[in-house]
Amino acid sequence: MLTVDEVGAIPLFSDLPAAELERLARMAADLHLSPGEFAVHEGGEAALFAVLAGKIEVVKTFDGVERTLGWRLTGTIFGEVPIALGSGFPGGYRAAEPSRVMRIEVQQYYSIAAVSKDVAQKVSALARERMGGLQSVTAEPQKPRVTLVGHRWDTACGDLRRFLARNQISFTWLLPDTPDAEAFWSTLGRPAQDGPVALLADGAIVERPAVRDLAIRLGLQTRPRADEYDVAIVGGGPAGLAAAVYGASEGLRTIVIEREAPGGQAGTSSRIENYLGFPSGISGDELASRALQQAKRLGAEILVTRSVAGIDPATHEVVLDGTDVVRARSLILATGVAWRRLAIDGFDRLIGKGVYYGAARSEASSTHGQDVYLIGAGNSAGQAAMHFSGHARSVTLLVRGPSLADSMSHYLIEQLRAKSNVKVQLRSEVRAVHGETHLTAIDILDKTSNEVSRHECGGLFVFIGANAETEWLPADVARDARGYVLTGDDVKKAGHWSHGRDPYLLETSAPGIFACGDVRLSPVKRVASAVGEGSMAIAFVHQYLANEGKAQRG
């Protein structure tokens, strides 16, 4: 418990009246920190802290790499910048040794400032000083972690660019036949290559790297660290990340297995504007990044670039591509869905070469000055059209039906109408694609006039719904005719449950295996519902593990 003498020993508060010191000692939080424990994380809510004893390290993550910005010693304060700006903490504050700090809530600080103008002036002056320091740090040129040389239409180069962008690894992309690429090779003293070639920040040069090899070199986790987990989550979309956050926070040994990058399909969304708590909207990759940081901070392991070859319903073992096996006491299936494919002649030949399923934000830069087309009438198509409208010369949304209103949110329809370079073409569909090395043109059928016209096309992005890719699951995990996983009452109604107890709401026909998010049979397909189901799945995992433990003891 804080004493008046301890509070008065902080220089900022030394001249406060005795009554104010007493009130601070009574109301401020007294935090005792072990080495490595955070007083507040980056992005944490505004508050004012004072160091009573020990040493606090100021850290901030730049491009996935943590940097130390400074130290706070006994008698100093921190939190003045968030209070001045009304924002979260720009960095994290971590104990470098056993430390003790006092935390003063914002309203408590304002009460003190109202009594002592001197305290308010000192905090404001310190905030200005430290904001200047932050500006100098952010003004430093940040060296990209990867420099990638490769042709735009090289599929391998495209896969690497998408992987780096989805995992939020900073990179510079150089086209081989440009002065920048020539200067790059000259600096390295190596003959020019078409690529893809990756130069890493540590100076290593990797020719035609496999995605997983690049992930390993960049320090991303690709193999499990523990022998066994309480819960293994297959899929790192919103449902899987939510399950990871709640599982790890509640003390479960948690691992997420993701074949590409955290975020799932939602991670490619340019803007999600109807997600609770973000009044200005949030991009899919930003939402995924925050969830990923949260899950990792709480202790979850996240594997990337690992596909699941199969699962054992009896032992809950997960067999990964290669030789690794993840052993877990329970499983959560959060694999989401995959974009539905178009059956157009020559379409598959041009995938990644001008034709794309979905739209990662990283593709926007390649549409500068181009006429691009999007197929679809849902929110994903509308969000992508809005994002591309800031880059492409024109964006045309091709819709098979007579209206957007049946499938797209009203706010998106209104936003599209306000964009002068966005056109919605109803009752239309693509009949053919053209191009040798890459897409150059498409044929569009106008179903009203029954006429086909050819249009130059700098990019075609497809959003025509999705399918559950669950063929890899064992027969013990029941699915409907379209591959969606049955859970809870649906399992019983379909006659796939033969155990003594009823299945939990999100439990599949295999006890101890749960499903959440888009892969689960449900009429609702929303980011918010996926997040909710991910957290619910952990609650049922707890019940399952508790009952399993009782059965073993009995």
Image: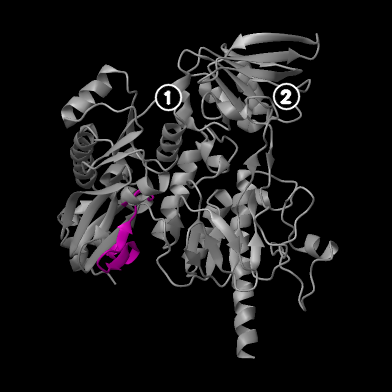
Q: Element under label 2? A: loop
Label 2 packing within 10 angstroms: few (<14), some (14-19), many (20+)? many
Work out whether mark 2 precedes mark 1 in sequence or the reverse, and give the earlier one: 1
State the image coordinates of residue 70 (x, y, percent, origin top left). 17, 50
Please tell me whether residue 135 is drawn above or below residue 174 in the rendered image: below
State the image coordinates of residue 545 (x, y, percent, origin top left). 60, 75
Q: Residue, x 34% and y 49% (percent of image)?
A: 42
Q: Mark 2 = which residue?
A: 404
Q: CA distance from mark 2 to mark 1?
A: 33 Å
| Image quarter (top left, top right, bottom left or bottom right) of the C terminus | bottom right
Q: Are marks 2 and 1 in contact (CB under 8 Å)?
A: no
Q: In the displayed structure, does residue 417 sit left or right of residue 16? A: right
Between 554 and 475, the one lying in front of the other is 475
- The magenta span reads 22-47
Q: Residue, x 48% and y 72% (percent of image)?
A: 228
Between 438 and 372, the one lying in front of the other is 438
Instruction: Say the numbered circle drawn on residue 152.
Output: 1
Q: Element under label 1? A: loop
Q: Residue, x 69% and y 25% (percent of image)?
A: 344
Q: Amino acid at mark 1?
A: Arg
Judge whether residue 383 can be spotted in this image.
Answer: no
Q: In the displayed structure, does residue 387 sit left or right of residue 115? A: right
Which quadrant of the structure image shows residue 503?
bottom right
